[in-house]
Each structure stands twice: as C-alpha cells, then as structure tokens.
Image: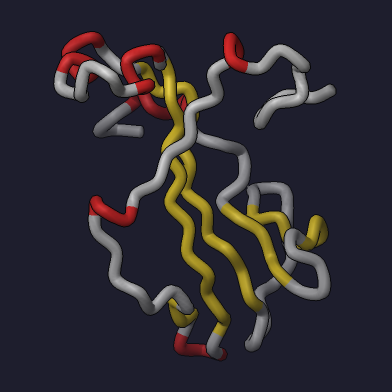
Amino acid sequence: QNERPDLVSNLPKNLGFGMGLEFRDSQYILNAKNGTLFREGMVFTLNSVLQNLELTDKEKASTPSESAIKKVDTYGLQIADMIVIRGDDGGEVMTKLKSSLSDVSYSINDDDDDDDGKGVGKKG
C-alpha cells in the first residue's frame, strides 16, 4: 500500500485456497474472513493476482507488429505456488521447477472472433 497505492484496487479479495478432495475447497479460501487454523499436512495454493492492469501505448509499441497484445488495453497477472504445511517449521513450497520468462504463457480473449458467445471467459 505504501509503495504502490495505485495497485491496491487491482488486488483480489482472496490469497489462495486449500486443496483436498476437491480442487478448490471453499471451506479453506484464504481471505480475511476465514478463521480456519492451518494444520500439518494441509495443502494450499497461494495465488497472487493483479487484475485490470493498464497496458500503455509505449508497452504495446515494444511488441511485434502482428502481436495480438496490440489489441489489449488491460490485462491480469497471476503467480501461484502450492505449499504444504510442515508443523511448526511453516510451509514447504511444492513447486520445485525453475521458471524463466520463456515459461510465461498468456491467452487473449478476442470477442470479435467468437460469434457464438461461448468463448473463453464468457458465459453462455
């Protein structure tokens, strides 16, 4: 908040979720309202997301001319890792693979290319 107050409105209400028999156990959503105590062996996905970030014309200019990114005005950024609670020692990050910029993936939803209204990110 002190260093980048402009990003506060782009943060989600949840920091992640617990995993169990179901992929996203709604009982273990990590947010200020959840008072559940962590126990050894519990597995969580920590999920840091910034939403509705603006992509400037200067940033678009640095992409190849045929890039679909040139059509994008806002974007979101998500970084996630799985952790397991290890008693009093805290948690252990389960994501052991190294990553680099070449591992980054993105997807652009272009509403103009989807005539049936059932594309990614749409209800229908």
Which of the 4 image quarters holds residue 28? bottom right
Residue pictured at 69% horizontal, 26% vertical: 119
Query: Residue drawn 43% across and 51% down?
Result: 79
Query: Image check: 98 left or right of 53?
Result: left
Coloring basis for residues: secondary structure
Rendered residue at 81%/60% (across/down): 27
Camera-side residue of 65 and 104: 65
Q: Front-most of 55 and 70?
A: 70
Q: Quadrant of the N terminus?
A: top left
Which part of the image, by quadrant, shows the C terminus? top right
> In which quarter of the view is residue 38 placed?
bottom right
Counting from the top left corner in percent of width and height, residue 46 is at 53, 60
Judging depth in this view, the residue of 52 and 123 nearest the camera is: 123
Q: Is residue 43 above or below residue 1?
A: below
Q: Position of residue 4 (x, y in %)?
A: 29, 29
Residue 111 is situated, as x and y percent measured from the top left of the image, at: 60, 14
Name the residue: 56% across, 51% down. 15
The location of residue 116, given as percent across then percent down, is 77, 16
Mark count: 0
- Does residue 30 lie above or below 45 as drawn? above
As drawn, 20 above or below 30: below
Residue 54 in the figure: left or right of residue 41: left
